[in-house]
Amino acid sequence: MINTNINSPDFNSYASEADLAAFADLRGIELPDKTAPLLIRAMDYLEGMNWAGRRVNPAQPLAWPRKEVYIEDHELPHDQIPRQVITAQCMLAVEAIDGELLGSVREAAVKTERVEGAVTMTYAVADGETFTPSYPAVTALLDGLAIARGFAINTFAERA
């Protein structure tokens, strides 16, 4: 059962099933009959993010609500879940229709790809390392609310 009451000890979702239904309806997305598992899988993904600010109550069941979170120099209210977080959960719930968001078995990205006479691309994926899924639209939506964990990109250009 989905519980969106931030004051409840059983609080387990930022988005309600009605939020997800409205999100999907506006986008012409058909949802399965059971949407609660989709929202919970989306929550699992969101709970693994590195969020700005601090929890309002260290004992609260989920990362939000938070304090000391600023968007464009304005502090967000301590007693609300930002609309962006609710929308991100709905976006991830739609992604979860096709499978796990945090699956433990993924194929590794392509290591080297060559188009003869044009381009050679090499990806930095070590042997045995798995591909980590990313959701750029969710990341963009949560800009300022979630803190990037950091990454590096090495590139080389070579004239033929």
Image (cartoon, rainbow, N blue to C red):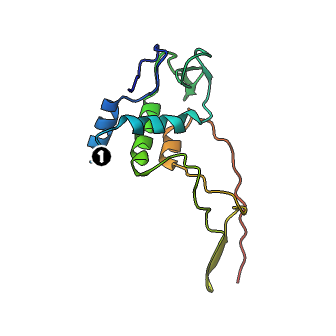
Q: Name the residue under label 1.
A: 27
Compared to 72, does 122 lie above or below?
below
Left or right placement of residue 33 versus residue 39 in this view: left
- Give the quadrant of the C terminus: bottom right
Identify the residue at horizontal 62%, vertical 24% (top origin): 53
Crowding near the residue tagged with mark 1, few <14, some 14–19, many ≥20 C-alpha atoms within 10 Å: few
Q: Position of residue 31 (x, y in %)?
A: 30, 44
Q: Residue furthest bottom?
A: 117
Q: Where is residue 97 in the image (x, y as percent from the top left)?
A: 39, 47
Identify the residue at horizontal 62%, vertical 62% (top origin): 108
Left or right placement of residue 144 versus residue 96 in this view: right
Please state which amino acid type lies under the numbered disc 1: Arg
Q: Position of residue 153 (x, y in %)?
A: 70, 57
Identify the residue at horizontal 73%, vertical 69% (top origin): 156
Identify the residue at horizontal 53%, vertical 43% (top origin): 139
Which of 68 and 113 lies nearest the eye of the viewer?
A: 113
Choose top left, top right, bottom left or bottom right for residue 54.
top right
Query: Total number of numbered labels?
Result: 1
- For label 1, the SS is loop
- Give the quadrant of the N terminus: top left
Which of 152 and 103 lies nearest the eye of the viewer?
A: 103
Choose top left, top right, bottom left or bottom right for residue 158.
bottom right
Compared to 104, does 36 lie above or below?
above
